[in-house]
């Protein structure tokens, strides 16, 4: 009697890396290459390239930086949630902001992990999201839960406390415009711009233009 043996061949998890730092992409590629069940199928240096490659390559996991030129990692997660649901977005970032975790997961990301995480944790996160699970870096998981409670009450969000003018000052400042330019654009005095910017810093808990610019960029305001 002849017997046939069916051997199931497991396909590797395909991963697309999107980050604007070439050195980091190289390190991630080398790390993932050492894992037999993971395969890096492409790399992108900005959000637009990431979306183009994601559509062409249909990876299981898109490992995306939250802050890069073009669409942010959060924007990408939101777009792929509807157009390409089989590609799971894992946010990899230096920001351990619980409110960003909540924003990313709500947009459609499957996971959120910080760049200082140990290598074994990143590998674990990729495997979890590839199979439809969710993963959040343990150190900020509790903070994300607190942020989730805040998000249920929009009035409790610091961003919700900004006035329309303060939002405009925030956006124009983040774009690098001077106080004089912002004043002329909005038809107000320079002292009003300075006062509005000070209010933005206070309400959002930001310290200086660098943090303000990162805040605006992470949320797709610039």
Image: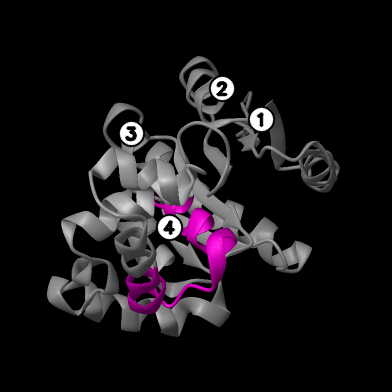
Task: Say which element carries label 4.
Answer: loop
Mark 4, residue position:
133
Task: Decide: few, some or many residues near mark 3? Use Cα within 10 Å; few <14, some 14-19, many ≥20.
Answer: some
**Circles 4, 2 touching at the beta carbon (< 8 Å):** no
Mark 3, residue position:
79
> In the picture shown, does residue 154 fall above or below 134?
below
Mark 1, residue position:
45
**Circles 3, 1 touching at the beta carbon (< 8 Å):** no
Task: Decide: few, some or many residues near mark 4? Use Cα within 10 Å; few <14, some 14-19, many ≥20.
Answer: few
What secondary structure is the magenta-colored segment mainly? Answer: helix
At x 46%, y 78%, the residue is 141
Q: CA distance from mark 4 to mark 3?
A: 19 Å
Q: CA distance from mark 1 to mark 2?
A: 7 Å
Specify which label sits upstream in the sequence, 2 or 3.
2
Specify which label sits upstream in the sequence, 3 or 1.
1
Label number found at residue 106: none
At x 43%, y 78%, the residue is 205
Specify which label sits upstream in the sequence, 4 or 2.
2
Specify which label sits upstream in the sequence, 4 or 3.
3
Q: Quadrant of residue 21?
A: top right
Q: Is residue 215 magenta?
A: yes
- Quadrant in which the N terminus appears: top right
**Residue 177 rendering spot, x and y as whole percentages:** 47, 43
At x 76%, y 68%, the residue is 118
Q: CA distance from mark 3 to mark 1?
A: 18 Å
**Circles 1, 2 touching at the beta carbon (< 8 Å):** yes
Mark 2, residue position:
49
Relative to 50, 35 lies left or right: right
Q: Which residues are magenta?
A: 198-221
């Amino acid at each position: 009697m002849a017997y046939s043996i069916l051997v199931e061949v497991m396909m590797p998890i395909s991963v697309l890396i999107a980050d604007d730092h070439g050195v980091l992409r190289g390190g991630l590629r080398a790390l993932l290459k050492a894992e037999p069940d993971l395969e890096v199928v492409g790399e992108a240096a900005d959000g637009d390239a990431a979306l183009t490659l994601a559509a062409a390559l249909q990876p299981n996991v898109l490992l995306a930086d939250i802050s890069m030129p073009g669409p942010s990692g959060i924007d990408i997660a939101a777009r792929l949630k509807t157009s390409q649901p089989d590609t799971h977005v894992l946010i990899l970032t230096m920001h351990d902001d619980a409110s960003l975790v909540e924003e990313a997961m709500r947009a459609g990301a499957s996971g959120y992990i910080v760049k200082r995480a140990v290598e074994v944790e990143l590998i674990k996160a990729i495997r979890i999201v590839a199979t439809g699970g969710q993963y959040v870096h343990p150190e900020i998981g509790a903070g994300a839960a607190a942020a989730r409670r805040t998000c249920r009450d929009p009035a409790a969000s610091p961003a919700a406390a900004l006035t329309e003018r303060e939002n405009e000052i925030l956006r124009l400042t983040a774009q690098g415009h001077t106080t004089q330019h912002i004043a002329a654009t909005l038809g107000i005095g320079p002292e009003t711009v300075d006062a509005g910017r000070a209010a933005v810093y206070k309400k959002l808990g930001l310290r200086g233009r660098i943090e303000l610019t990162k805040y605006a960029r992470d949320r797709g305001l610039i």
